[in-house]
């Protein structure tokens, strides 16, 4: 099964080398001029209603864990879905344009949402500098910067730093996971977010442990509010 999956991935990567203009999702139709997907796939994406819903899955997921003004994911994430494929391309295949496209989509949704406080500053969930060196970019930064550019909101990726590799999370309880992750972050310029409406952005919310730790760090700097926004969230989040 794993071998089959690997073969499919190889095949998909090969397709994009030979036909770089095909949609990243279906591999059949030509992509639109300003996106990595065909029109049909853009319309079929599993969009959430989080931007307009007070009691949405993201907020429910973090209820009692962190204080959030609002939280949303653009898409629903499922193992083996097109959304997983898209996020994989963004994170591991140098397809930064995917983050830019979703930054643009998020900007539109954020501007129309009545529930998000207008952010003063956008901060991405950081990755460790070794990972950054290896990958060349932080996928959450690509998304957050594009969102900031389209909404004219300040984007800051140097305020929060990941200062060590996180140990394996497997087999740990949720509380252990959170404290383990929280210890790995440093806030460099807390005064820059004091009394500001802060928006934390990430590529995908699965357990939420990383976002929870990041938000707890951010709250220490006494912001006016904290909200979270991701490209996708697992359905149980
Ligand atoms: Zn398509």
Image (spheres, rainbow, N blue to C red):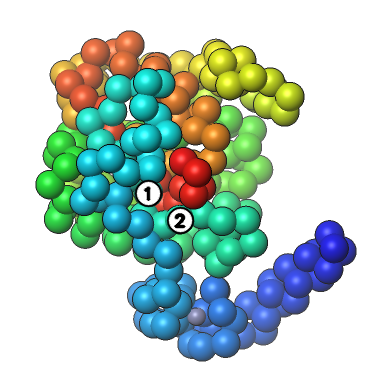
Q: Can residue 113 be seen in this view?
A: yes
Quadrant housing residue 200: top left
The x and y percentages for residue 100 are 38, 59
Q: Mark 2 points at which residue?
A: 76
Q: Left or right: where does residue 181 sit relative to residue 220? A: right
Residue 38 vertical position relative to residue 144 in the rendered view, above or below: below
Relative to the observer, which residue lies in front, 230 or 100?
A: 230
Residue 214 vertical position relative to residue 127 in the rendered view, above or below: above
The disc placed on residue 233 is none
The x and y percentages for residue 171 are 73, 24
Which residue lies at the image location 23% right of the left edge and 31% below the top edge? 69
The x and y percentages for residue 129 are 58, 31
Q: Left or right: where does residue 136 sit relative to residue 156? A: right
Which residue lies at the image location 64% right of the left edge and 24% below the top edge? 166
Q: Left or right: where does residue 148 sit relative to residue 73? A: left
- Total marks in image: 2
Which residue lies at the image location 78% right of the left edge and 65% below the top edge? 5
Relative to the observer, which residue lies in front, 79 or 109?
A: 79
Which residue lies at the image location 85% right of the left edge and 63% below the top edge? 1
Q: Distance between the residues labelled 1 and 2?
A: 7 Å
The disc placed on residue 73 is 1
**Classed neighbour count for the residue bearing mark 2: other residues with Cα under 10 Å, few (<14), some (14–19), many (≥20):** many
Residue 177 vertical position relative to residue 1 in the rendered view, above or below: above
SS class, disc 1: strand
The x and y percentages for residue 193 are 24, 22
**Classed neighbour count for the residue bearing mark 1: other residues with Cα under 10 Å, few (<14), some (14–19), many (≥20):** many
SS class, disc 2: strand
Relative to the observer, which residue lies in front, 236 or 67?
A: 236
Quadrant housing residue 49: bottom left
Q: Are marks 1 and 2 in contact (CB under 8 Å)?
A: yes
Residue 84 vertical position relative to residue 223 in the rendered view, above or below: below
């Amino acid at each position: 099964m794993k071998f089959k999956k690997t073969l499919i991935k190889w095949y998909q990567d090969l397709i994009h080398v030979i036909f770089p203009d095909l949609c990243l999702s279906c591999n059949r139709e030509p992509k639109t001029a300003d996106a990595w997907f065909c029109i049909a796939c853009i319309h079929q994406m599993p969009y959430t209603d989080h931007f307009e819903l007070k009691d949405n899955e993201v907020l429910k997921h973090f209820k009692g864990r962190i204080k959030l003004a609002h939280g949303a994911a653009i898409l629903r994430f499922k193992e083996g879905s097109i959304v997983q494929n898209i996020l994989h391309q963004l994170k591991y295949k140098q397809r930064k344009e995917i983050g830019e496209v979703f930054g643009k989509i998020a900007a539109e949704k954020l501007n129309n949402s009545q529930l998000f406080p207008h952010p003063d500053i956008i901060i991405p969930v950081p990755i460790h500098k070794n990972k950054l060196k290896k990958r060349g970019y932080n996928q959450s930064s690509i998304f957050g910067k594009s969102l900031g550019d389209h909404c004219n909101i300040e984007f800051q990726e140097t305020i929060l730093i990941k200062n060590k590799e996180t140990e394996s999370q497997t087999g740990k309880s949720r509380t252990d996971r959170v404290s383990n992750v929280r210890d790995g972050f440093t806030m460099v310029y807390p005064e820059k977010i004091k009394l500001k409406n802060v928006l934390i952005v990430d590529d995908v919310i699965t357990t939420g442990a990383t976002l929870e730790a990041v938000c707890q760090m951010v709250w220490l700097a006494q912001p006016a509010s904290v909200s979270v926004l991701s490209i996708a969230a697992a359905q149980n989040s």
